[in-house]
Image: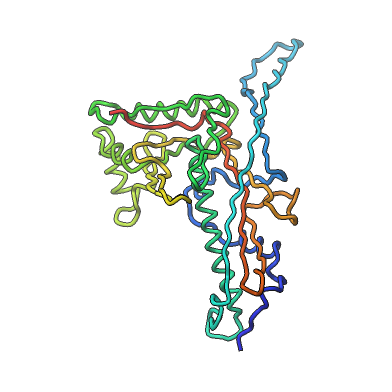
Amino acid sequence: MPVVINPFDTGGYSLAEMTRAINIYPPVPTVMEELGLFRPVRSVTQRTVLVEQRDGVLNVLPSVPIGAPPTVANRDVRSTRSFAIPGIKHVDVITPYDIQGVRGFGSGDSADPLAVVVEQRLLRARNKVALTREYMEVGAIRGVVKDGAGTTLYNYFTEFGITQKSVDFLFGGASTKIQTKVLEAVRIIEDNLLGETMTGVVALCGKTFFDNLTNHATVVDAYKYYASTGAQPLRDDARRNFPFMGIMFREYNRTVSLADGTTDKMIPDAEAYAFPVGTMDAFATYAAPVEHMDVVNTPGLPVYAWQEPLPRGAGVELNVQAAVLPVLQRPALSVKLYSSN
């Protein structure tokens, strides 16, 4: 006879157990996860995070004669900005009909059907939270982070008082030297690193921008050569990683469905956004505790989950919450690429 755990008995289904389980599930493959830009998540104990901006610059120190006084360090100019961390809430309900007559996974009778259903629902909820984070983090790369309803939470260029840098690639001109345009974008990032470090530059491209780039007269031969040699022909998708003049161009053609039923592009078709990878502090996602008494004033986790019984034995309600905010802490390092013709 199959073993059925009483859904009203929270043993094994407590907040701590379910939160641990939902955070153990492997993350959904996403571009932000692969690039590691906003990883690891930074835990904070409050729903507001203070980001301190230091306008200090690393200087080359001059030599001084023996016995001469040393150079004196300048004090960094600091400014602090406060950002409220938004909450993500998702509820799913398991009713008796979801487990009635359902045998546990596998051929044996020992598997608990309720546990199987709970695991399936937790994994589905984890995937939804991961997609929401991806949408928010890609938005942060572009400088404007939005929630799942498409509502703007923060414009980091406005918040930090910085004008967004951009490069017009002028794809419509056959004589345009794309190599020069690419180097211009790289140099903008290099010039604004100041005290930061990087290991390279990546550009996430809309499909139209990527096609115009790789089909341009000054680039087409380089792309053909890369597609036929460096990208493992007939096996790899050359759109995923096309290195050219110091930037790894990557087409990111993905549309997400928003909460109101409309859709939004992660990266607009005719645009691209270049940014450094391997930085120390340019990108950060902050996680705060959610609305549950057991986690008040504790370091935040990426996702929380718990169950609550419904009245009159109607079922079990699964609650999944997250309180996360990706922050573009160095907006000057995000460069918009586009073409005006």
Q: Is residue 66 above or below residue 80?
A: above
- Residue at image position (58%, 70%) is 94
Q: Is residue 154 left or right of residue 298?
A: left
Foreground of the two, 256 or 222: 256
Report x, y in % for residue 248: 41, 40
Quadrant of the rendered structure where residue 268 is?
A: top left
Q: Quadrant of the C terminus?
A: top left
Q: Is residue 57 above or below residue 116?
A: above
Foreground of the two, 240 or 68: 240
Report x, y in % for residue 297: 75, 48
Quadrant of the rendered structure where residue 311 is?
A: bottom right
Quadrant of the rendered structure where residue 125 is?
A: bottom right
Q: How many marks?
A: 0
Report x, y in % for residue 12: 70, 71
Report x, y in % for residue 107: 53, 85
Q: Quadrant of the N terminus?
A: bottom right
Question: What colouring method underlies this structural image?
Answer: rainbow
- Residue at image position (41%, 48%) is 262
Q: Is residue 317 above or below residue 151?
A: below
Q: Is residue 18 above or below residue 46?
A: below
Q: Is residue 269 left or right of residue 125?
A: left
Foreground of the two, 151 or 253: 151
- Residue at image position (48%, 29%) is 189
Foreground of the two, 103 or 209: 103
- Residue at image position (50%, 38%) is 141
Residue at the farthest front position? 312
